[in-house]
Amino acid sequence: MSSTTKKNLQCSAAAHFHLPGLFEFFDFYRVFLPLYRKHREYFYDWCDIGSIYGAPAGCLWSGGRVGSGNGNPRDVLALTREYGISARLTFSNSLLQKEHLADERCNELCRLFEESPGPENGVIVHSDLLVPHLRKNFPHLYLVSSTTKVLTDFTALEAECDREEFRYVVPDFRLNRQFARLARLNTRRKDKIEFLCNECCDFGCRNRRACYEAVSRIALGAPGDAFTCRAPGAAQGYRFSKAMENPGFISVQDIQERYLPMGFSNFKIEGRSLGSALILEFLLYYMTRPACQLKVREEIYLDNELDLF
């Protein structure tokens, strides 16, 4: 790393990682977060945990991935509150209709998250019907514009950042390396952008929106054809090694040497539909000092109460 980059890093804000599996990997975070607090020296001092996001199974408003989380909402909130971490509900269903806004379970979850003391909690949202409903009924929850909108046009990204409803905006991963245009954004827009780091989806995929819509139909119990991804290598499922080869991948070095010096500080890690063993690998790669990765892995794997697979 050059001396100029080191100087810029000293002046920049920390990287805030937004982690997957608030409900889905609740048992994992019950083990990881105490370790993270007790042995902060194992982890990079230039980053922290900005939020953990997810949704319980069976929520009408869910989107992005088919919900499978079984963590108790009150227990989940107690954990994030104890460690001073924001909790986000992934309510990014793109196909909501007016009648869905009255869903008792989703509204109750929002109420619990809004009333929880401690760090401010949020909702990741896609539907423009849901946005005003949340702002009216749960004004203390901040809103995140979901990557399920598939914002691949840079002008559209700028317009989304200018919407005062959203505190954060997650663009499509194919805009991650538009460095010339990203560098020209003003500070307000830079503060809002949250980059998706580890997407494995084919960079040339034209069916990303259709994939997300299929997930939204499943959440609503609506009829429709199942989505089958036909991109090269899709049958293998998610591979972190494959994601690292993606043209939109954001590495640790990229964060340190490009994004932080440019003034960006929010980075999203995907993985709600994956196993907790892979979540651990993401946290080792993005947050853990290389010399301490084995220590963290041993601490987690040797916990007899945790099933990582």
Image (cartoon, rainbow, N blue to C red):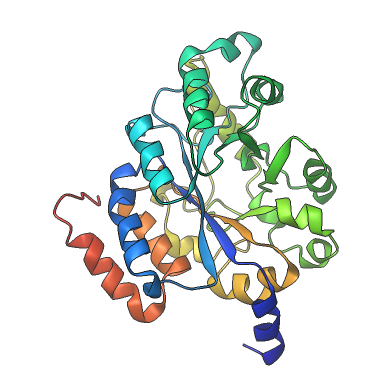
Closer to the camera in the image, 190 or 233:
190
Q: Position of residue 89 (x, y in %)?
A: 51, 34
User: How many numbered marks are there?
Assistant: 0
The residue lying at 53 percent from left, 23 percent from top is: 61
Quarter of the image holding residue 161?
A: top right
Q: Is residue 25 left or right of residue 60?
A: left
Quarter of the image holding residue 174?
A: bottom right
Q: Position of residue 199 (x, y in %)?
A: 54, 54
The residue lying at 46 percent from left, 38 percent from top is: 54
The residue sitting at the left extreme is 304
In this picture, is 208 found above or below 140?
below
Q: Is residue 299 visible?
A: yes
Q: Position of residue 154 (x, y in %)?
A: 81, 51
The residue sitting at the front extreme is 117
Closer to the camera in the image, 290 or 197:
290
Closer to the camera in the image, 155 or 47:
47
Closer to the camera in the image, 110 or 287:
110
Q: Position of residue 153 (x, y in %)?
A: 79, 47
Q: Is residue 63 visible?
A: no
Q: Quadrant of the N terminus?
A: bottom right
The residue lying at 41 percent from left, 51 percent from top is: 83
The residue lying at 69 percent from left, 43 percent from top is: 167
In this picture, is 137 found above or below 257?
above
Q: Is residue 281 left or right of residue 150?
A: left
